[in-house]
Image (tube, rainbow, N blue to C red):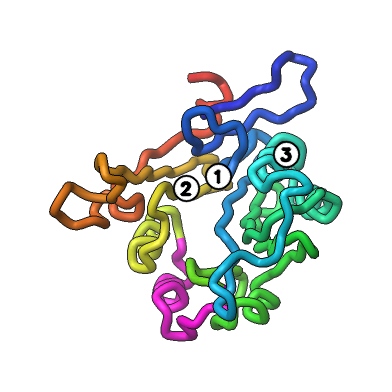
Amino acid sequence: MVHRGSSKRSSLQPFVSVAFPAFVGAVTGISQSGIGISEKVWMTYNKKELLPGSYDGLADVFVLRDILQTSKNRAEAAKYLEAAARTWAIWIGIGDYETQQFDLVGYSQASSVVYTDVTAPTMTEQPYLENLAYVDKHPQPSHDGATGTLPTSLADFYGNITSETSKIIAQHHQTGDVHIATYDYSAKVMYVSVGKTNHAGDFGPVGGDDSVWKAYNRPYLKFNLPDLWAGN
């Protein structure tokens, strides 16, 4: 879904998001200025529930939409998150055209902290990989350790992590049930895979494999971002 300002004088940046009918927030998307976002829930093992939070503030999906519409780079996004009326805890991934780099943000009601490849392992307890910040699908700190499916697959493709190899990594880690998006900032291309469910809400045919229709097992669509901004 492509969103544009309501008028030519609007200061809000156009952006594209992977969304749902009648959903006005954002969880996955990239803006014309070149900032891309993604998110995952932040749970812990000591209590298998969300970190402490509140409904008194700005919903996470509107915070993410604000980043797409108003931030031009990672630094502006980090500053916005620090000042936001934060509610519930999520992990946010933020990358941009300007720096060609990625921030992993631990976002909660109490604080908003940017983690890098060097500092992320202090929260995730997973192996350090130079120039690669990541968090797996599990509650954090992860119990998968150094032999988990995400760090091992990242290590296997280390130095050759591309839009194509990331599809293999996501499938091996079995992450991305509903949808997956990959942004290639240099090529200005976005790849999207969308999951499918049957009438009972299972990701597969009735009586069959209930994971075969998860996004990580389905084909990807390739979008040329300049075409989307031009309305092609």
* Mark 3 residue type: Asp
Asked if the magenta segment contains residue 159, the reply would be yes
Nearer to us of marks 2 and 3 is 3
Instruction: Find residue 207 and report its horizontal and vertical position in percent.
Output: 13, 53
Name which residue lies at 26% across and 57% down: 211
Label 2 and label 3: CA atoms lie apart by: 19 Å
Nearer to us of marks 1 and 2 is 1
User: Can you identify the residue that label 3 sits on?
Assistant: 66
Does residue 30 show up?
yes
Does residue 128 show up?
no
User: Can you identify the residue that label 2 sits on?
Assistant: 181
Instruction: Find residue 64 and report its horizontal and vertical position in percent.
Output: 67, 44
Q: How many marks?
A: 3
User: Which is more N-terminal, label 2 or label 1?
Assistant: 1
Label 3 neighbourhood size at 10 Å, few (<14), some (14-19), many (20+)? some
User: Which is more N-terminal, label 3 or label 2?
Assistant: 3
* Mark 1 residue type: Thr
SS class, disc 3? helix
Is the residue under label 2 in contact with that under label 1 (CB below 8 Å)? Answer: yes
Q: Quadrant of residue 217?
A: bottom left
Residues in magenta? 140-161
Note whether 54 is above or below 23 in the view shown: below
User: Can you identify the residue that label 1 sits on?
Assistant: 28
Name, please, the residue furthest toward the left: 207
* Mark 2 residue type: Ala
SS class, disc 1? loop
Of residues 25 and 46, the one drawn nearer to the viewer in this rendering: 46
Label 1 and label 2: CA atoms lie apart by: 7 Å
Name which residue lies at 57% across and 67% down: 49
